[in-house]
Amino acid sequence: MKIKNLKEYQKLCKKTAQKFKDKEKEIMTWGLGIAGEAGDLAGCIKKTFSHKNDQKAGIRENLGDTLWYAAMICNFFEWDFNEVLGENVEKLKKRYPQGFTKKAAKRKGIDWNER
């Protein structure tokens, strides 16, 4: 299936989501869900590149699951996923107007020599 746009994706995610009466339990489910899927994603990347155990299918699957939870968080707050992503890009363009460099990041408080 090919998704046309993020608005359509958000609607499709909502159709596959559990319904909650308790709003607090709902947002906790989406928040904990994204954390869990991001952890699974990180584990697959580690296994693929540190242990030479090809987990690319798992990376792809867990990336999709992570984005599903991100869409559900946007749905919860009635945010447009596309706008959230656009705001993030605008923030990064202001932070790194000439593009990312280690020198520019250091001015922002990140010392890349310590990493």
Image (cartoon, grey):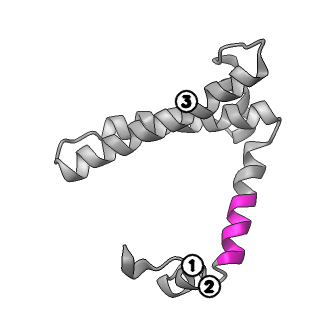
Q: Quadrant of residue 5?
A: top right
Compare residues 14 and 32 and report the one nearer the observer.
32
Image disc number at residue 46? none
Amino acid type, mark 1: Gly
Question: For residue 92: magenta?
Answer: yes
Q: Where on the picture, by quarter, is residue 31?
A: top right
Residue found at x 38% / y 45%: 42
In the picture, measured across the screen, residue 54 lies left or right of residue 95, that is left
Question: Looking at the image, is mark 3 or mark 2 earlier in the sequence?
Answer: 3
Residue denoted by label 2: 98
The circle on residue 33 is 3
* 19 part of magenta stretch: no
Q: Relative to 99, is 6 on the left or the right?
A: right
The residue tagged 1 is: 109
Q: Which residues are magenta?
A: 87-95
Q: Residue at x 67, y 76 (%)?
A: 95
Report whether 81 appears left or right of 66: right
The residue sitting at 68% across, 73% down in the picture is 93
